[in-house]
Image (tube, coloured by chain):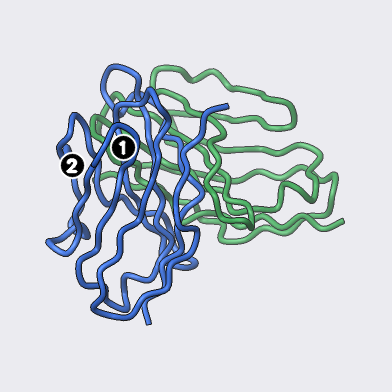
Chain colours: A blue, B green
Amino acid sequence: EPEVTQTPSHQVTQMGQEVILRCVPISNHLYFYWYRQILGQKVEFLVSFYNNEISEKSEIFDDQFSVERPDGSNFTLKIRSTKLEDSAMYFCASSGTSGRAGTDTQYFGPGTRLTVL
Amino acid sequence: AQKVTQAQTEISVVEKEDVTLDCVYETRDTTYYLFWYKQPPSGELVFLIRRNSFDEQNEISGRYSWNFQKSTSSFNFTITASQVVDSAVYFCALIRNTDKLIFGTGTRLQVFP
């Protein structure tokens, strides 16, 4: 069964450093997402991406964050200058072979645990 | 505003007991979708079910069943004859005419042998 994969599973970084989290969405999906989950809290939407551009973003997704689909398979989340409060589990998801994103199920990857020291 | 409330923070049961996880949602939209995801201790989010707002039929899948009631804005999830492997955090989520899933705060289910 196709699945979303994410690397690395755990990333430790120093405050102020840049990190790139990588995702390989399900191959025929058209919509891609990043969510985050601070430890013990609920899952929060960060950004959605379709047709090589951001389609929606939350207020969490400020100028420190960017997303990119550098090739036909990868989808990345970059945090330019990490802060302590960026420590969280970051989930990538993908959905939609056709139609509006909201009508299709989002399938999640296993997550990347980011620890900012 | 859209919101999903899971009032039960944590539930503990003994194996073979039935357990119901509550989910109440708020939205002004007439078209929306509701979901349940499971987050086992390993941390991933596993899709369980999607239900659209026009389909109030209850659904059963093995030991899992879901009760969708628009009149009370609820989408409850029942596990029959619970097993230790059901131990996880369960999230209810809502999506309307947009891209983002709105999650509840989750219910941690612990099933003891």
Callout 2: chain: A
Residue beneath the point at 32% across and 79% down: A84
Position above or below: A90 against B85: below
Q: Quadrant of the C terminus of chain B?
A: bottom right
Residue beneath the point at 34% across and 54% down: A44
Image disc number at residue A76 = none
B52 on left or right of B10? left
The CA span between labels 2 and 1 is 11 Å
Circle nearer the viewer, 2 or 1? 1
Image disc number at residue A56 = 2
Quarter assignment of residue B82: top right
Q: Nearer the viewer, residue A29 or A101?
A: A29
Q: Secondary structure at mark 1?
A: strand
B58 on left or right of A64? right
Quarter assignment of residue B109: bottom right
Q: Which residue is labeled 1 in the image?
A: A32
B58 on left or right of A107? right
Callout 1: chain: A
Mark 1 belongs to which amino acid? Phe
Label 1: few (<14), some (14–19) or many (≥20) C-alpha neighbours in 10 Å? many
Quarter assignment of residue A36: bottom left
Q: Nearer the viewer, residue A79 or A37?
A: A79
Residue beneath the point at 35% across and 45% down: B102
Residue A33 location, x and y as percent? 31, 42
Mark 2 belongs to which amino acid? Glu
Residue beneath the point at 30% across and 26% down: A30
Residue B18 location, x and y as percent? 77, 42
Q: How many marks overall? A: 2
Considering every residue shown, the one lying at the far left of the view is A63
Q: Secondary structure at mark 2?
A: strand
- Label whose residue precedes the other's in the sequence (2 or 1): 1
